[in-house]
Amino acid sequence: MANIYYIGGSPCSGKSTVTEILAAKYHLFYFKVDDFIDKYLKMGASKGYEICKKQDSLRADEIWMREPALQCQEELLYYKETFAFVLEDLMQIKEKDIITEGAAYLPELMRKLNISNNRYISITPTRDFQISHYKKREWISFVLEGCSDKEKAFSNWMERDILFAKEVQKQCIKENYVSIINDGSIEVDEYVHRIAAHFGLY
């Protein structure tokens, strides 16, 4: 049976950066959930899952001009609807040692799978860290293409992810999982060291 290490959290927190380094350093197979988000959305929609069907049909304004709280609620529901697809792909990997990351790994879902405390950790950003790093992403304008008010849409997006981060932190406390909050004050190498130690990789 494969050794699987899970990194959850929220977008723009440094999950991918840390996971890439850990995978290379400890010779782990890296499974990135975000690479398959569109695939899982289509699969859920084809099965008639409510949130997947809804999100698959929305135009840009219908996505980003909604209240951030509603966006966050539906994002959480989307991950719950598609979680089985993530696990199915994960179980198809033949490598012995796997590290995987994505917002899909909600603490409450990890606990339902009986994932041990030393095989899961979450990383979430502070508000300032999140917004400053999102603004550096070249694909932001592509995501917001078609929005009538891109500034408002971006603001709603940021608020959605801030609410999502708070929910993940709250779930970590409830489920007794370790949660790292990235405010940008600690170097990436230090995060790598902390997470490697948490997972017992050295």
Image (tube, rainbow, N blue to C red):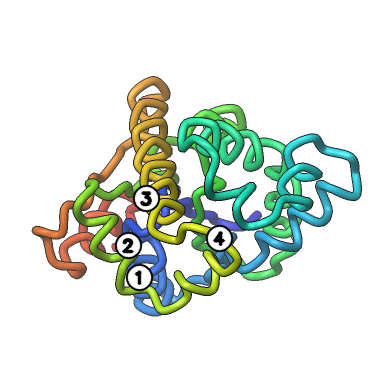
Tell me if residue 107 comes above or below residue 44 in the rendering: above
Write the residue at 41% across / 51% down.
152
In space, the residues marked 3 and 1 are separated at their CA atoms by 24 Å
Q: Say which of marks 4 and 1 sits in front.
A: 4
- In the rendered structure, which amino acid carries the disc numbered 4? Cys
Tag 3 residue:
155
Circle 1 residues within 10 Å: few <14, some 14–19, many ≥20: few
First in sequence, mark 3 or 2: give its number. 2
Q: Amino acid at mark 1?
A: Thr
Q: Are marks 2 and 4 in contact (CB under 8 Å)?
A: no
Please state if 200 lies on the left or on the right of 31 as rendered.
Answer: left
Circle 4: is it few (<14), some (14-19), or many (20+) Cα within 10 Å? some
Query: What residue is drawn where x is 72% and y is 56%?
Result: 91
User: Mark 4 or mark 1, which has the lower sequence index?
Assistant: 1
Real-space Cα separation, disc 1 to disc 2, in angstroms:
5 Å
Q: What secondary structure is found at the residue carrying circle 1?
A: helix
Residue closer to the observer: 49 or 110: 49
The disc at residue 147 is: 4
N-term-proximal mark, 2 vs 4 = 2
Q: Which residue is mark 1?
A: 17
In this view of the protein, can residue 97 be seen by the observer? no
Q: Are marks 1 and 2 in contact (CB under 8 Å)?
A: yes
- Kind of element beneath mark 2: loop
The kind of residue on which mark 3 rests is: Ser
